[in-house]
Image (tube, coloured by chain):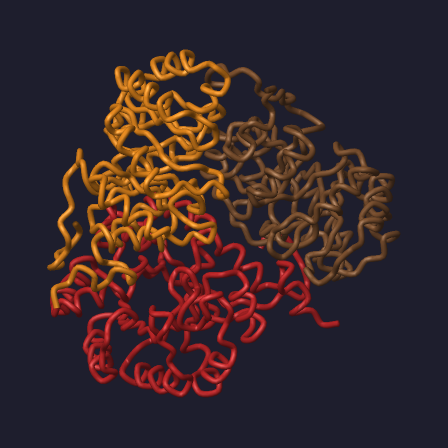
Chain colours: A red, B orange, C brown
């Protein structure tokens, strides 16, 4: 840190299992990736190339190389897996992962209907090849999954070999864990946390008020995701009690 | 594309007449222009220097040169034409176009009262000098133009020599084609499309939900505009059915 | 300017006392700072490193050097002062200001309870060391300060040695001077302006509609702050009557 302040919550060093920040890159240029790493690389644990943006970005190989040399794992958004799945081309997806030297992959069913046994079988298969993150929750705001089912799915997917389960929110933070207004489904999150270890979950929380809510509930070292590259510094100050919203949360009176 | 996926809608090659993406640059630096071109240049057909930002940007000549060398046409936002018009200085505007070597210009009346015959006369004159885009719709959210009049104006302006007509939405997407909430005036758009060929219209659609709506209505190769530079990749995935919102729109069942 | 237009409001040259634009840097990279200065340096009078972001940014010394060489004063957000204050470490804060060669500082009480005499005493002390900006208004949207008290506090803080007083709005523009919807508390602002000279106040106004409102009320040379780096060009066009919102505001009929 640049100077000393007392009573700052402790953060773990990378690579960490708790307090992860997962950032969404939805089409940065190579220089923008370098800039992001300069500013926030030490606070970033994972980068997701949002949904299927990797299909159309012009600089994919070079971008992956920059993240790799900075020691930041990258994975393709789950929608890409679903795009191959719905076409019956999952084997081709596995070849793409190899072709680009991917070490992580996300398996989700946010835009498709997929039986949970089928999903778990993919988690099992893929986790032979890469570290798997699996995502629970629909991108369809009309599709409400009750808490007991979130818990059941998360548990099944972790048992099938997922390294972490991700709670869905999209780039906007207005589905899945959240109401269309962006408000947290508080009861859902609290019930999940009674059954699934917090370190096994990454909560997608792109809006500041959502990040604040999770830091207040779980602590400085909550795992959050879908953070915009230029919001990682803000998130870090929220974690440390150095933004107005969490200003006195970590202080002993 | 970076890998193979079946059942992806076909896009045309540049220079194309259909499936145009018009991007708004409201003050990028030279390096940011280069970054944008690296990421999204092949998906970008036109760049507008938003409203009269070209008056105050410090790097105008150099910026125009970068776009030119990338083969991307640039034009000044229509508000600049209106600023010269309301001062009675349109001749000076024509000299400015020459001075900067502009090959395109926008003629609009979003902030001024202008008789449609007068507007068409300017379209006729300017189209001797440059390729003209003309814009229909007011920037004043209280000013509702009925559909038959949109159609009449668009037809007149195309006949006067406009290469494309643009449907107004501003940077925010909350006037003209849209309600102040951003919701599409669906009946308006559908009625326009019964009379004006889709390839003659560029729909300003800065919000993601608006882009999704137009892609679903018109198809992958709809012309849309006022896209933020860092949203072009997202738009391209929406066109191709590779984002959640249009995920199964192009799939044969 | 890049070309001539008549009837453009006059702006003052830097360093100016009126018509200030204060920009919030919440974690730019070094190249992004250079890009921002290229585009908008001549329109930017002050840069604030938002709240306590300076604690966690990896490039602080180099960033300060770039701003310095461009002649743009920089200060740490008031929340940083408050973070030291609430820990009883204000002396350490003064050492940090020296260590980084800061010539400006902000004193605020947006997140803490602080007696106004205590605040004025800090303004007095700090203004021996640096140029002080003091901020009035709470970051808590439930805490409404009546107009007479805003005026009393602003007057006391200017008398205690503050160079300018800042009206609070946060990054979002939804507290202090504004309702949670972003709407201006018009009566509050107008009453303040009957008692405090406009050139002594910097109004935080991050939203475009807020900037438009202040330019229409006070004029092209109003002091505004918390402007995002990529919105400075837009603000400048609003000041000059070259965006739709203020398009005919400065024209003689």
Looking at the picture, does residue B17 appear above or below residue A135? above
Looking at the picture, does residue A56 appear above or below residue A78? above
Q: Residue at x 20, y 71 (%)?
A: A129
Q: Residue at x 50, y 32 (%)?
A: C243
Indicate left or right for C106 with C35 as reference: right
> Percent x, y for residue A28?
34, 47
Indicate left or right for B231 with C207 as reference: left
Instruction: Place residue C20 in its image quadrant.
Output: top right
Residue B59 can be seen in this image: no
Residue C17 can be seen in this image: yes
Looking at the picture, does residue C186 appear above or below residue B107? below
> Percent x, y for residue B196?
23, 39
> Percent x, y for residue B3?
15, 55
Q: Residue at x 31, y 42 (%)?
A: B203
Which of the image's four quarters has the C terminus of chain C?
top right
Indicate left or right for B194 with B234 as reference: left
Q: Residue at x 16, y 58 (%)?
A: A99
In front here: B171 or A31? B171
> Percent x, y for residue A144?
38, 78
Q: How many marks?
A: 0
In front here: A221 or A2? A221
């Amino acid at each position: 840190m640049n100077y000393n302040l007392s009573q700052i919550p402790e953060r773990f060093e990378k690579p960490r299992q708790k307090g992860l920040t997962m950032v969404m890159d939805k089409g940065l240029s190579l220089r923008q990736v370098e800039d992001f790493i300069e500013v926030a690389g030490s606070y970033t644990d994972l980068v997701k190339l949002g949904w299927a943006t990797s299909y159309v970005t012009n600089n994919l190989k070079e971008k992956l190389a920059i993240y790799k040399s900075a020691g930041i794992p990258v994975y393709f958004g789950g929608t890409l897996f679903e795009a191959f799945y719905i076409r019956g081309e999952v084997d081709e997806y596995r070849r793409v992962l190899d072709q680009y030297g991917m070490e992580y992959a996300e398996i989700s069913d946010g835009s498709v209907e997929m039986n949970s046994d089928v999903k778990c079988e993919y988690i099992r298969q893929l986790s032979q090849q890469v570290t798997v993150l699996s995502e629970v929750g629909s991108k369809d705001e009309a599709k409400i999954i009750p808490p007991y089912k979130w818990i059941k799915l998360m548990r099944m997917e972790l048992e099938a070999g997922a390294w972490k389960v991700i709670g869905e929110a999209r780039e906007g933070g207005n589905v899945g864990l959240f109401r269309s207004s962006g408000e947290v489904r508080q009861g859902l999150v609290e019930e999940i946390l009674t059954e699934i270890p917090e370190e096994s979950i990454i909560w997608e929380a792109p809006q500041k008020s959502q990040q604040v809510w999770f830091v207040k509930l779980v602590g400085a070292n909550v795992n959050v995701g879908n953070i915009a590259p230029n919001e990682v510094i803000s998130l870090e100050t929220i974690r440390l009690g150095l933004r107005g919203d969490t200003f006195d949360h970590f202080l002993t009176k």
